[in-house]
Amino acid sequence: MKMYLELYASLMHLLPPGNQRHRREIKIEQGTVVQDIIDKYRIPLEMAHIVLVNGVFVCDERDKHVLQEGDVLSIWPPVAGG
């Protein structure tokens, strides 16, 4: 299945090669959960601070949320600003 992985700010360097700045199309197996992607792309757990699937916050369900064809998984590190 195809889905999209978006990594932002200091996590962007963990994306596989591609021509888009922060988004890559990736292939996943049926039954893949959010935590599987975090592990596969070696995203440090403390850096996966804001986690969304299709714009919906799923931080507390990383090991339960099964990804589907066409999903967009977006991950931000902790950020600060004013």
Image (tube, rainbow, N blue to C red):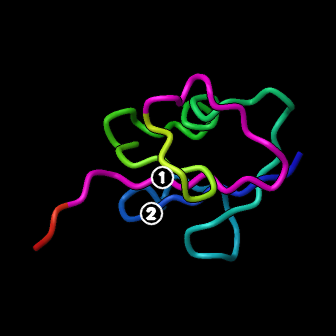
Mark 1, residue position: 75
Q: Is residue 24 magenta?
A: no
Q: Quadrant of the C terminus?
A: bottom left
Mark 2, residue position: 8
Q: Is residue 21 above or below residue 69?
A: below
Say which label, 2 or 1, has the lower sequence index: 2
Residues rendered magenta in the picture: 60-79
Residue flagged by tag 2: what amino acid is it? Tyr
Query: Can you give x and y, in whole percent of width and height, for residue 12 in the image?
Result: 48, 61
> 30 or 54, which is in the foreground?
54
Q: Are marks 2 and 1 in contact (CB under 8 Å)?
A: yes
Residue flagged by tag 1: what amino acid is it? Ile
Quarter of the image holding residue 39?
top right
Which residue shows up at 36% across the image and 59% down it? Answer: 10
Count of numbered labels shown in the rendering: 2
Q: How much space separates mark 2 and mark 1, taking CA atoms?
A: 6 Å
View extreme (top): residue: 63
Instruction: Tell me: 46 left or right of 57.
Output: left
